[in-house]
Image: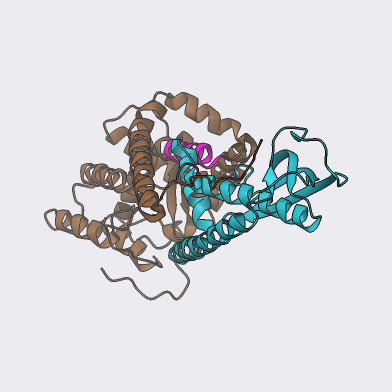
Chain colours: A brown, B cyan
Amino acid sequence: MRYENPKLPEHINLPPRHPFKESLRLCLVVIGGLVSFWTLLMLTTPWLVTLISFDTERQWVDDLDKNFLNIQHSAPTSEHGKIQRYLQYLADEIVATSATDPSMAVTVHYVEQDVINAFATLGGHVIIYRGLLENLPSENALTLLLAHEIAHVQHRDPIIALGRMTALVLSGGAISGFGSNAISQRILNHMGLLSSLRFNRNQELRADEVALNVVYQQYGTLSGAWALFTQLQCHSTATPPAFLSTHPALTERIARATALAHSTPARTTPLPDFIPQDTTNRPPCTP
Amino acid sequence: MIAELFVFTGLLLIGFIAGQVLEYRHLRSIRHREQRLGPILTFAKRFPANQQHQQAPHLVTGCVVISVDYFKRFVAMLYLLIGGRVKPYESLLERGRREALLRMKEQALALNANLIVNVKIETAAISKGATAQQIGCVEVLAYGTALRDPNLTS
């Protein structure tokens, strides 16, 4: 018998390819699929997470160690306790004024740190820092701030933001193929960020609207309330354009608040004497 | 973020250009050597048709390790998401298989053999990427028994 090595056709195992065109098509399919999947996820998450009742949400947070929120407990007679009680009183007034479910109790925490910030987080907890409080010129601005954060709580924005973040981490982990340990580790890492939950533009604008309504109902004017936004803008390190920011740009919010304020009487309610004043030599803020 | 995107795009571009050039050159070299080593016959069966051979049998092996480029790895990762034939890896394994057979034949030629029987091919993924699913390099090993059959005319 005669044997030989024939030349085998190459196109069977190595068909002609256009790698660039192929990968481009592949990328478009994958990106399209991911965008559709994530859009669906982002649209359904708010509905899914709000199936969790506010009481359950509050119970979860109460079970957590709240050290990450830097919450301080003080004697009721101390200066800190006095401010805390005053803030809680204002918050209770706001909850009573805004026509929402009164069972959604809000707890305000005053933190003695120079941070110029305030935020709402899970379980109806609102945190306000001394840095911001001492820069507010009137009670109107403080009420606007608290009403804005309380509106986030009442709209269930914190749990929606957490739900979206968790959904993104889980789906990202599932797609990129991280192990279950890595996914749970990532979720735990994000749970540590409860103090920096991000809300989207619509959530912020909706909270602004509710807050302005509350201020108007309580004081009969919006005058002075926009000072809150000018303060935030003054101390903001970056002001990205509105279309790039998840938050509506502060200038846009100031314009809205100023326009509303000009149509109401110009009078403000001063803050009580025990509210700390800014002792640093920061330049004055001008709208 | 922008810097990372630039690095990623740069790596993809380098991987694409270098990968294409190297693959083209490798396949050209393979075709050329396949022609040169064509007279050495390879058989999957365990024993030669004519067992009257003069030379003592020798084990011959051909081993190659080929790395996948960044571009192919990225495209393969996309295929992992949507399924289908992972074409970049098909060409990688084809090159590995043919190169391993050629190296085995080179050994046989050095031993003055003109046929190899009981040829087997094995592959192994080595040097996995950042995650267990990513393949960094593939090793292909071809081995068989080299013989000299004086009656074989090729």
Q: Quadrant of residue A151?
A: top left
Count every numbered label the image shows and give the total. Answer: 0
* A167 left or right, relative to A72: left
Name the dominant secondary structure of the magenta segment: helix
Residue A162 at x, y = what percent? 46, 39
Q: Quadrant of residue B142?
A: top right
Q: Say if the magenta span includes residue A175.
A: yes
Q: Measuring 45% from the left and 40% from the top, which residue is drawn there?
A: A168
Residue B70 against residue A167 in the figure, above or below: below
Q: Measuring 43% from the left and 48% from the top, which residue is drawn there?
A: A119
Residue A96 at x, y = what percent? 32, 33
Residue A194 at x, y = what percent? 51, 43
Q: Measuring 52% from the left and 36% from the top, which residue is drawn there?
A: A174
Considering every residue shown, the one lying at the far left of the view is: A263
The quarter of the picture where the C terminus of chain A appears is bottom left
Residue A262 against residue A178 in the figure, above or below: below
Q: Say if the magenta span includes residue A52.
A: no
* A99 left or right, relative to A102: left
Chain part drawn in magenta: A163-177
Q: Confirm whether residue B26 shows in the render.
A: yes
